[in-house]
Amino acid sequence: MLIESTRSTSGLRLNSFNVPASRRRCLAYRRRILEISQQVTAVHVAPAFSCLEMTDVVYHGLMRSSPHPDRSPFFLDSFVMSKGHGCLSQYVILEDMGILDRRDVERYCTPEGRLGAHPDYGNPGIEASTGSLGHGLGIATGMAYADKVKRDRRVVYVILSDGELQEGSTWEALMMAANLDLSNLVALLDLNDFQGLGRTSETHPHFYPVLDKVRAFGWEAAEVCGHDAGAVFQAVSLRTGERPFFLVCKTVKGKGVSYMEHVPIWHYRSPNKEEYAWALAELREVAS
Amino acid sequence: VRNRFATTFYEAGTRDERLCVIVADISPAGSIQKFREEFPTRFVNTGVAEQIMIGMCAGVALRGLRPFAYTIATFTLFRPYEMVRDDLCYQNLPVTIVGIGGGVTYSTLGGTHHAQEDVALATALPNMAVIAPCDPAETEAATLWCAAQERGPVYLRLGKAGEPDFTSHLCTPWEFGKLRYLRSGDDVCILAYGTIMKLAAALADRFEALGDSVSLVSVHTLKPLDHDAIAEVLNRHRRVVVVEEMAPYGGLGPRVKEIAWDIRADCRLDTFGLQDEFIHNYGSQDQLHAAHGLDIRSLSKILDIG
């Protein structure tokens, strides 16, 4: 299935998105993340799995490549992984696109390497340092504002976690981005309903509904399944482009590996050898 | 100094279109209002929201602009401290955060508006430079430097209004990272920075009246500190006195003591600053200083020049 966005937003060129290709890529990315998880003891596998399709859509569907795709800034548009602990999804995609070196990814979290468990500005393809939650949307708001003032037709994409939507600073940014009419800002929320101490819907029921809150803050907003890459692409492509756009992406933490899904311990844990084999087998079944 | 900052910033802004200012609901003093009217897109008011003020500064700096964050010192530094640390310092972005009313300038507003530990907090951050000019002329020079610099984040600690002129007659220019002699003598040296230079100058007068040859030095750059020049001060003078409007931990006094120890200085060294206490007194800035022992009588007594 090839999804064509039916109209361009803010004068951006039309784009298209190949959903089966995205599905194949995301399987390969999940396998690659599991492979990396065998080198180090503590990684954020499940948080990366929950935003993987979203990140894939940003890089392979939404971001326009620059005339010089071989050197920084690599893209015409920008991406900030505000949910810094999801950056394995970003690393494997940047590796696949040839922006990060294979050796960089293999030296993940080691003294010889330069990639850590949170993105660090200055590394290839990393546009902002994140990790502490509640920073990325503010930085992206500044980027989008500067682009608007400079009449630079860039779009700034941000992936947020639902946990960091509890940070007051995120709401300061939501308020300000709307006040500044930043129609060139697109936030994608990885709503997996899990945070450190359990299910958000149980521990913080008034966190919901998210969509209404964001709309009340002056954003255009929509909701999709965050693992349906075609739906994510289409929702972003069909935004009116009049206001900042917020896409609530309902996701499953640990998506793709049955024993990780909805199980908090996989926020940090690396699978052992047996679990690794099991996960690979599951991903192979899906592929076939 | 606040107005001199505003005038200088406005003039620099007319020459350099990268300059912009992001404020958090502070009424733009003097020429900042003019800047706002002439360059509306380069003036952003985030409202009473300091975290997004710093976050936006980082974002626009990543796009090549040169933002100044501007509000009362407690709100540019304390409230959004982690944004200052992660967004500005960790990413090493050329952003100036202006703290109006550093120290206890807002002397009737109570402890919530006193930035009495700001220098310690700002200097603790890697990549951060810390500048505290002592008068309007130094404020102008420091502002121009901040507007043109590429090295990274700066905390610019300013007073508010009515600071006397100490430096406009000097032949030696203001230079980032260098001590600046306002008077040059051989016996006693007084080191100070920011608005408390007034007290330091009065102290210098007192020593001079007793027949001492006195140096009065503006340590306007607290970080990077001019280590070698401070070592020279300690070697060259019989007595050295540090006067600062800062909490006792992490300010200039302890740094000068460290250097004195390292170089085995044999001068007498006295350091004075605010106490490790919140201030519940109200009145003028001088009266608040006096409540913490920062007045000419108390200092003279301890220094045996009363």
Image (cartoon, coloured by chain):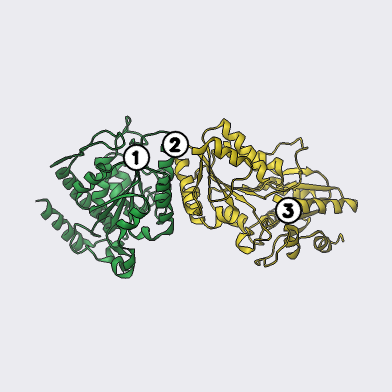
Q: Mark 1 vs mark 2: tell me if same chain.
A: yes
* Chain letter behind tag 1: A
Q: Is residue B260 visible?
A: yes
Give the residue at x 64% y 38%.
B7
Compared with A122, A30 (above or below) is: below
* SS of the residue under disc 2: helix
Q: Is residue A168 left or right of residue A250?
A: right
Residue located beneath label 2 in the image: A149
Pick the front one: B61 or B40: B40
Q: Which residue is mark 3?
A: B196
The residue where tag 1 is placed is A155
Q: CA distance from mark 2 to mark 3?
A: 40 Å
Q: Position of residue A40 (x, y in %)?
A: 31, 57
- Between tags 2 and 3, which lies in front? 2
Q: Nearer the viewer, residue A59 or B305?
A: A59
Q: Is residue A256 left or right of residue B190?
A: left
Q: Amino acid at mark 1?
A: Val
Residue at disc 1, secondary structure: loop
Q: Disc 3 versus disc 1: distance between alpha carbons?
A: 48 Å
Please state the chain letter of the residue tagged with numbered disc 3 in the rendered image. B
Tell if the residue under mark 2 belongs to the same chain as the one under mark 3: no
| Residue type for callout 2 | Val
| Chain colored green | A
Which amino acid type is shown beneath numbered disc 3? Answer: Ile
Give the side of residue B206 with respect to residue B227, left or right. right
